[in-house]
Image: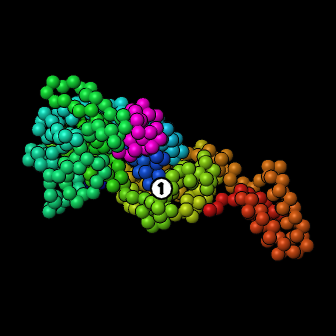
Amino acid sequence: MKLYNTLTKKIEEFKPINPGHVNLYTCGPTVYNYAHIGNLRSYILADLLYRTLKYSKLNPIWVMNITDVDDKTIKGTIEKYGKNATVDNLREFTQFYLDEFKKDLDEVNVLRKEITFYRVTDVIPQIQKFIVDLVKKGLAYVAEDGIYFSIEKYQQNIGDYGELVGHKFLEGKKIGARVSVDEYEKDNLSDFVLWKAHNPETDGQIFWQDECGDNEIKIMNGRPGWHIECSVINRIGFNGEPTDIHTGGVDLVFPHHTNEIAQSQALFGKGNFVHHWFHSEHLLVDGKKMAKSAGNFYILKDLEKKIAKKIAGVSFRYLCLQTGYQEQMNFVLENFIGALHNLASIIEAQRNEDKGKTTECDLEMAQNNLNIPQLLAGMNKHLTEYKEYNQILGLDVDSDEVQYYFRPLEDWSLPEEVVNLKNQRRIAREGKNFAKSDELRKQIEDLDYEVLDTPEGQKIKRKISL
Ligand SMILES: [Zn+2]
């Protein structure tokens, strides 16, 4: 299998570190809100990678963190529970969005039940221990407002801090200032926070005490920064082994993944963390970055409002399959509806295929740097192999559900109002009153139904449009 590696900037032959299994890690969501469709695309792409590894019999083990404590989850908890909100409140607040996230993964056919999830608030003692070890090694230091990672010490003792971003990254940048927020820009190379001291003004009563009881290094009351969790969970999730492949969106290359590498290599040595970095490109909406303020922001629930809940997720997945993971995907609502129609025609065609035939799907396309658009095109030509291709493409959908939207409906299943309009329209057409007929068609469409004039007369379907 060949795969592009962000670290070496090359397509490489992929080989597991330890033969017999592949350790696959994906940066999970921050559960302070619903995942948007850009987030979901990156999880669909990780799922395509997981399925390709699985179908190639490489036995992937898939681990994902859940960020349930950070600046944003704390802010959301305080807004909901007030300024004295506790860790229990934080757990409750984030559990809701975690459950919603899992439902979304199910809707887009990610093999969610095969993922091992770790909530950050479940691994606080291990995070504290990791930080204590970093301080003892001289790579981190205790300040008044928290414990920070020293980029200067890393550069002196371990290696190039900017290796994932690229060689020129460090040029002309000043090292040394400190940054305590979880997300920041790359203008300054600041020492980043591993553990934030408790601040009642912003954190309410959300903090943890020292739970690792080290004799030399005392952890102040506080909570972890964002980046440390992934270094720790990579290690816990794979029983201390290094990670074969780490996935995430390109926006995570800096600072998040850069800092993950620094923290982990500081403790385990250079080359002993992630061997292969897999980054997926951004999703744009109408050619622009998605933003609530720009009115082009979608979560899966918005798409479900457009079409049936049970097929919106798979239709979105089908749309995602058409763009390579290293290309920006431009989401346009019209294309989403088009994807639904295509999916429906594949399912319809598949029903009519000879079900006895089975052939192996040609895996080469997926194994060639995850060329899923080519695999999809291959499936469209060989629908008899649908089931084989589908092990990777993951387009399983309840075909009755699809039919429900595409088959003409019998009068008994239509609202009386629609049946009345239909009958009036038949009379108008018999009397050649086409203006009246068009007006009645419009009235039917306003009720979210569609009229087809066929040789057997009028047929009514559910309307699928924007
Ligand atoms: Zn992460």
- Who's the residue at 46% across and 46% down the image? 33
Q: Is residue 335 visible?
A: yes
Determine which residue is flagged by label 1: 320
* Image side of residue 222 versus residue 342, left or right: left
Query: Label 1 is placed on what type of residue?
Result: Cys
- Give the x, y percent position of residue 312: 57, 51
- Give the x, y percent position of residue 294: 47, 64
- Give the x, y percent position of residue 80: 47, 41
Residue 217 versus residue 384 in the image, above or below: above
Nearer to us in this view, 290 or 114: 290
Nearer to us in this view, 68 or 167: 68
Nearer to us in this view, 432 or 307: 307
Q: Quadrant of the C terminus?
A: bottom right
**Quarter of the image where one finds residue 417:** bottom right
Disc 1, SS: helix
- Give the x, y percent position of residue 145: 22, 41
Tell me if residue 86 is in the magenta stretch. yes
- Who's the residue at 54% across and 45% down the image? 107
Number of labels in the image equals: 1
Q: Quadrant of ligand 1?
A: top left
Q: Main secondary structure of the magenta part?
A: helix
Residue 288 versus residue 204 in the image, above or below: below
- Who's the residue at 80% across and 70% down the image? 439
Q: Residues within 10 Å of mark 1 (few under 14, many from 20)?
A: many
* Image side of residue 223 versus residue 397, left or right: left
- Who's the residue at 23% across and 44% down the image? 193
What stretch of residues is rendered in magenta?
Answer: 65-92
* Image side of residue 75 versus residue 236, left or right: right
Residue 256 versus residue 60 in the image, above or below: below
